[in-house]
Amino acid sequence: MTPEKKTIALLFGGRSAEHEISLLSAASIYSNLDKTKFEIISIFIDKKGNWRVVESPLLSPEKLNKGSSATFLPWDENRLSQPIEADIYFPVLHGPYGEDGTIQGLLEMADAPFVGASVTDSAIAMDKAMTKIIFKGKNLPVVRHLVIMEKDWKQNRENILGQIRKELPLPFFVKPACLGSSVGISKVKENSQIPAAVDEAFRYDRKILAEEGIQGRELECSVLGNDDPEASLPGEIIPFREFYDYDDKYNEGKTRFGIPAELTPSQTKEVQCLSVEAFKAIGCSGMARVDFLMDGKTEKIYVSEINTIPGFTEISMYPKLWEVSGLPFPHLLERLIQLGFERHEKKKRGREDYSR
């Protein structure tokens, strides 16, 4: 007897600067999900936050944005009139309003199983400044950095400029605290470039990071699991441009990848151990990609950040690293769905019935 198919609601698009990357990730997931095991409901969220059930993520952006849309908000006249009947939800929403715990909170309120990290770990991982505080508290190696709030920048610009110049040697990076896919990031090579870099980062967030630039190698490692997470073989990004920016990631495509990275056995083990420790430090579940920097001279390895909804495009490291580690893309997706059900069931067993 053939097991009954599970219905997966794939959520993609979203109100984020990473909207277009989400479309690519969702298309890749859709193409690799085993259609003999899963029925897929494709739910497109446009840049205004409106929801639309569509044929698939493979449609062009023009077709995805065509037709009537609705909202889940109960006070909105244009709210969803028909319930979405899915066994589990698979958010593929990179950046704010998707990777930051907001969609996870909605699904928790609905008592619906979902793939990936929970509300708390999603919110923490989205905030690069907060993750660095937690990593330091867990004695994980992080680079020197400064956290700058927009209000402070406007009121104490010269003092902050002086602090940056004093504490961070050139070159260094300036980035939004709560965004991904290299959006809003600048590499500062001269002090005269600092104001423009800071202003650019503040276009996307009210809190930003100025972060030491490590001259060396960029490494990544994929993590999978709930209570007993496992790490893939590490990979290396070899940027075509000065650093792995948005254009190089998604437009030009000239970056090279080491899959797996050429590391000594001890370095490989160190990256894997640090990946699992970073995953556990924020209480993560489901999946995450942990990014690293390796100093070119000392070979010291630093934890850079953790991404709870990593890219799933055809060139993305998360699925590629699992594939080279022995877990093909379709099986990886099945495992992620299984982990989502497992976490939900464990949480349900611990709940009280407050309806009595």
Image (spheres, helix red, strand yellow):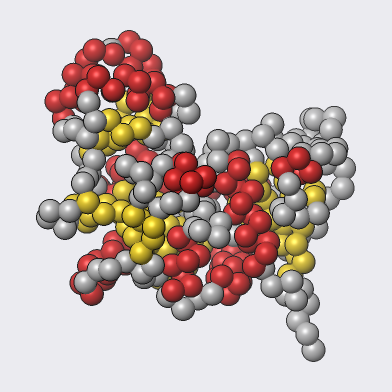
Q: Residue at x 55, y 60 (%)?
A: 314
- The answer to whether residue 355 of the structure is visible from this angle is no
Q: Along the horizontal axis of the image, is 224 left or right of 274?
A: right
Quarter of the image where the N terminus is located: bottom right
Which residue is at the far left? 298
Q: Quadrant of residue 30?
A: bottom right
Q: Is residue 74 visible?
A: yes
Q: Position of residue 213 (x, y in %)?
A: 24, 40
Q: Nearer the viewer, residue 175 or 207?
A: 175
Classify residue 276 by image quadrant.
bottom left
Which one is in front, 27 or 109? 27
158 lies above or below 329? above
Q: Is residue 221 above or below residue 186?
A: below
Look at 76% across and 81% down and name the residue there: 3
Instruction: Work out which quarter of the rendered image holds the C terminus and state it.
Output: bottom right
Q: In the image, is 266 to the left or to the right of 5?
A: left
Across and down, in percent, residue 73 comes to 75, 35
Residue most extreme to the bottom? 1
Count of numbered circles in the view:
0
Q: Is residue 321 above or below residue 22?
A: below
